[in-house]
Image (cartoon, coloured by chain):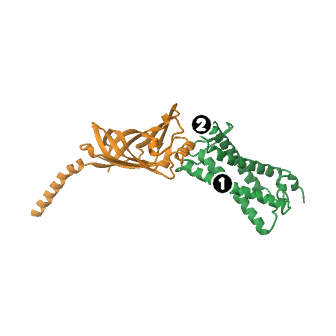
Amino acid sequence: MMFKKTVMSAAIAAAALVPLAQAQAAEYQIDSEGQHAFVQFKISHLGYSYILGSFEDFSGSFQYDPDNVGDSSASVEVDVTSLTTNHAERDKHIKSADFLDASEYPTATFTTTGFESTGDGEGVLTGDLSLHGETREIDMPVTLLGKGEDPWGGYRAGFEGSTTLTLSEFDIDMSKFPEVMHELELYVTFEGLRQ
Amino acid sequence: MWTNTRTGWGCISIVLHWLSALAIIGLFALGWWMTDLGYYDDWYNLAPWWHRGIGVLLLLATLGRLVWRLLQPAPVGRGHRLERLAAHVGHVLLYGLMLLVLISGYLISTAEGKGIDVFGWFEAPAVLFGLPNQASLAGLIHWYAALVLIVLSAGHALAAIKHHLFDRNDVLVRMIFPRYTRRR
């Protein structure tokens, strides 16, 4: 009897801990496999139109807790060789030593160093972006797009964010191109699957 | 006249040989020059257009040439056993490198599934695409294989001159005049 009581109280204590554990920042894996995530860029072409491109292979995870958004963090690793702009020869050129030098720097990474909430479901991620062998701190405003259970028994949260990168800061020489092509817009949207 | 015999090359082999030589040297020079062109150069888009078109035509010609070479007799080699063996290995390498350079070049432009327009006459369709980093890797092979091909071609030309000037045999002239097919 005594033994049973102990087991019972242990079970109750454990059950009581569950909501606490849930309230802590949960780890989410970016759904690269299901392709509910995109890393895209947009850069002017001579000031006349835009070139849109994306990186097809990347992976990452983030920590997110709706009750304590200040502890949010994320880290993403991008395979630079997977760049595509729908034009094989242009992609080869962009990945060559003239621009991204993907054979020398095949991976780009982003790791957050801080997060500041700017409103309900909105905030600014600060982090280190390593690209082309250069690491720079960037700010990226992000928005929570939605979260909840998915139809297959999982729990998801999705975000989008964008920022402007000045290419010379990453030692990418655009001096032979018009001023408007010296920077690009990076856009990411991703869905995380809670682990 | 048109076909090969054991003593000489026919017209078809001769024409294919010299057209290939001209195209390979031209494409090598064009490729070297055009990859250094600036974005604002008049030739920035036009030079690759010629390079791609001629390249596809040469690939087709080379496939036809290989079929012809295998179907037809070849003139007997000259020189010592070892010299003939070296010549044979060299020729196989030349054919292999030509295919490697031409196919790798084709795989650059078609890496993302789009075909190559050949002077508006027809489109060479993409058949192998979407491999990881395909255009960049094919580009690497294209460049180094082309360098080896040009060096080997120079050796090929020097060997032909050696046969003509020092060995004083018909190895060079029978690749120029089809009349050697009739000699016995």
Mark 2 burial class by Cα count in 10 Å: few <14, some 14-19, many 20+: few
Residue A93 vs residue A38, the one in the foreground:
A93
Query: Picture coordinates of residue A128 (x, y %)?
Result: 37, 47
The quadrant holding residue A143 is: top left
Question: Residue most toward the bottom?
Answer: B81
Q: Secondary structure at mark 2?
A: loop
Q: Which mark is residue B133?
A: none
Numbered disc 1: what chain? Answer: B
Residue A147 lies, with reference to residue B91, above or below; the image says above
Q: Chain of mark 2?
A: B
Q: Quadrant of residue A156?
A: top left
* Numbered disc in front, either 1 or 2: 2
Q: Given the image, on which type of amino acid does mark 2 rest?
A: Tyr
Of residues A97 and A72, the one nearer the viewer is: A97
Q: Colour of chain A?
A: orange
Q: Nearer the viewer, residue B59 or A153?
A: B59
User: Dot 1: what SS?
Assistant: helix
**Whether marks 1 and 2 lie on the same chain:** yes
**Disc 1 marks which amino acid?**
Leu
Residue where numbered disc 2 is placed? B40
Chain that is green in the image: B
Residue B147's tag is 1
